[in-house]
Amino acid sequence: MADPFLSIQHVKKTFGPTTVVDDFNLDIERGEFVSFLGPSGCGKTTVLRMVAGFEEPTAGSIIVGGKDVTRLKPNQRNVGMVFQAYALFPNLTVAQNVAFGLKVAGVAKAESDKRVAEMLELIKLPQLGDRYPYQLSGGQQQRVALARALAPKPKLLLLDEPLSALDAKVRVSLRDEIRAIQKELGITTIFVTHDQEEALSISDRIAVMYGGKAEQVGAPFEIYNRPATKFVANFVGTLNVLEGVVSDAGSGRVRINTEEIGLKGKLNGSKTGDTLSLALRPEAIALGPRPGHDAKLSGEIADVHFLGSVIRVRVGIGGSKISLDTFNNSSTPPPNVGDKAEISFSSGDVLVLH
Amino acid sequence: MKSGKSWAWVTFILGAAYFFIPLIATMEFSMRMKRGEYSFEAYRVVLGDPRFQESFTFSVVAAVFTIILGVLLVVPTAYWIRLRLPQLRPVVEFVTLLPLVIPAIVIVFGYIRMYGSNSPLPFLSSDIGTSALLVIGYATLALPYMYRAVDTGLRTIDVRTLTEAAQILGAGWTTIISRVILPNVLIAVLSGAFLTFAIVIGEFTMASLLNRPAFGPYLQNIGANRAYEPAALAIIAFVITWGCMSVIQVLSRFAPKSANRPN
């Protein structure tokens, strides 16, 4: 593999006695779009701020394009950043905001004007150059912030929860736009979010963070389908967790409530009598038998939620409630609460959490 | 409900009477210089007096320098306190309030002892040095107003994020303060500047004890020796002060609107 464009090596950050980021390592290729995903306080924004230069790592180093930038000031790094609160300069027009970085860099006026026009075209707001930030909607302001960050042609683009302050519809359209622009420019990008759907939908890779560490780094498909830890499995997507007891380690039989399923090859050295946490995604479970599903459990319908195209059904099995999704079919009414039900799934879809 | 509204009007009329009757009386008196008729004779005499023009010009120039010194001192300090040292804010607020509790006479005697001709910094050994010391003293007197005005202005913008946004775009501290912070607190700075102007124009103690030809000592001198001119001067000073306040109001309409709080 070629040298990574951005390399975050053994980075640690402490604030007084609190360690916020601990031995964080990540290599990012040129042109890659990587998301830092995690709950509040997991250290994702702190890592981003260290890459930007706003925080100095307590230990470790940050290499960009082969150059150690760990101790460089933010204004010496040639990095673009978009903030959650837009951070447009209220006293400047849209065009002046976009031109700010170019003016600071001493770019000639004609060239700066040309670049500003290009950027406004890129964000599809060429007619709003003379407006002030307060005259724009949230989505427009964030687009301008993106154009301002990209205008000086930064080596790296950092996006700090740029969509959090926007309403749901704008969020989806803007995230697609951000991804399209990133692909068009081929700029290496780090995107911080606590929204898993956002991260899964636009990233080349995701670093799921918890407690200041990267729990797992991988492609969205891999993160969702093969979570490496219990935290990743729980944090990314909806997950049903069931307690099971290994009834026969040799044949891979596991007892859940009063029924047994076979999980051969998944027990990872567990012994007979061990208790396991087993996880299943709602979409991997069917109500009733289905071809290819080799495991089944019996229970009772606990509740039914009509969500439009999908009906989410919860089935009580022992002390647990298992959620499963079925497509809405106008000719088949949803099940009734209290009905007996059988659920089926493929044992291959069961995740054994460690 | 109706009686509540009547009481509000009664209170307003009483307040307005308390404020305007002395003003009208002073104005009326100032116009009786010529026997048997109302005239602006007292104003003509005052405005035509070369000492009025000299002392007023001196005080205006001193006010301009005081404002420049105040802005250079207060804007970076208040900005830095908000950005990096918020824990020091109560201490700085206390220090900026001291000129309100320490009388100007104490400050000026301190200056006379500290900066006399035998001092390593002999401000008082020349006129220009004494005037500079007077400007420094005025800046101290105006500190509570200037600091509070600027601090309030800084509170209306997201100082930290705007600073970081400018930094990541390559700006250094001078650019950040001059192109991002100052323009966004300009109205607050102007408020502080006009309050400073009003203080400097009427200040007597410092100018008198440092023996500078300022407007305050001139006002006192006229007041002690003339009848109608002091009343005319009081009205002129009042108009200047209200003019300053009106300018603040007018300028505040042109304040840059915050991105997050459009109104």
Image (tube, rainbow, N blue to C red):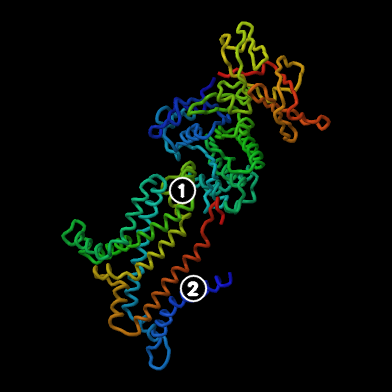
Give the alpha-carbon distance from disc 2 to disc 1, as whole Å: 41 Å
Q: In which quarter of the image is residue B43?
A: bottom left
Q: In the image, are marks 2 and 1 on the same chain?
A: yes
Q: Is residue A280 left or right of residue B51?
A: right
> x%, y% of residue A104?
48, 46
Q: Which mark is residue B11?
A: 2
Instruction: Name the chain under label 2.
Output: B
Q: In x, y percent, where is residue A244?
A: 61, 16
Name the residue type under label 1: Val
The amino acid marked with disc number 2 is Thr
Vertically, is A162 above or below A31? below
**Label 1 sits on residue:** B159
**B254 on left or right of B224:** right
Q: Position of residue B233 (x, y in %)?
A: 37, 78
Q: Which chain carries label 1?
A: B
Answer yes or no: is residue B47 visible: no
Q: Please, which residue is most extreme toward the top here?
A: A250
Q: Residues within 10 Å of mark 2 (few under 14, many from 20)?
A: few
Identity of the residue drawn at 21% across and 60% down: B115
